[in-house]
Image: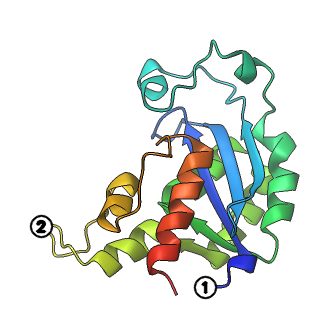
Amino acid sequence: MDLSNIVVLDTETTGLDSESRICEIALIDGDGGTLLHTLIDPQMPIPQSATDIHQISDDSISLANAPVLDSVMPRILNLLEGKELLIYNSEFDIRMLKQSCSDMYHPKVSELTQNTRCVMKEYAEFYGELNHYGDYKWQKLTNALEQQDIDTKPFIAHSALDDCLMTLALARSFME
């Protein structure tokens, strides 16, 4: 794995359904350097159930001044150009990007999947635990780190930036 050509992306969202939107996004490089980390105005209320997970609320002063996703999409796409993208649960984050940005960005977001590696799926195969269907069982990110003897204490789970750092640490532990 060529770390100089890697970008890791993570989002936090208002929920999991087809109406949910991104409320935080982070991108880091292969050395763990922050390329982008910002709250995003989801243009909808953040349900308490989501706030309970990531601690981002409608009352956050930072959220009140946050940009909408469309205003940072050109920067995101520029940072990802020519890079290999690592995401823990890529299907979810790519879907959330599409749901949260305007239609004009959908073709570019769809193109991202061509250079995206889903660390969650690759780790499931590497780890080898099977679910009751006989498929590789997906692991929670923090569980995967612990399974690889990576200390999770320095990280705050469900923070987009820390989730990127955890994804990178996990990828370094098992990917070629």
Using the image, determine if residue 21 lies above or below residue 99: above
Query: For this view, does 144 lie left or right of residue 119?
Result: left
The residue under label 2 is which amino acid type?
Answer: His
User: Which one is closest to the eye, mark 1 or mark 2?
Assistant: 1
The residue under label 1 is which amino acid type?
Answer: Met
In the image, what residue occupies the spot 80% across and 77% down?
82
**Rendering quarter of residue 107:** bottom right
Res. 1 mark: 1
Using the image, determine if residue 169 lies above or below residue 95: below
Res. 132 mark: 2
Task: Please tell me which residue lies in front, 86 or 35.
Answer: 35
Q: Quadrant of the N terminus?
A: bottom right
Using the image, determine if residue 75 lies above or below residue 3: above
- Packing grade of label 1 (10 A; few <14, some 14-19, many >=20) is few
In the image, what residue occupies the spot 38% across and 73% down?
123
Residue 85 placement (x, y as % from top left): 65, 70
Colour mapping used in the image: rainbow
Q: How many marks?
A: 2
- Packing grade of label 2 (10 A; few <14, some 14-19, many >=20) is few
Query: For this view, does 145 lie left or right of residue 56?
Result: left
Secondary-structure class at tag 2: loop
Residue 7 placement (x, y as % from top left): 70, 67
Using the image, determine if residue 101 lies above or below residue 77: above
Q: Are marks 1 and 2 in contact (CB under 8 Å)?
A: no
- Dot 1 or dot 2: first in sequence order is 1
**Rendering quarter of residue 64:** top right
Residue 150 placement (x, y as % from top left): 41, 62
- Spatial CA distance of label 1 from label 2 is 32 Å
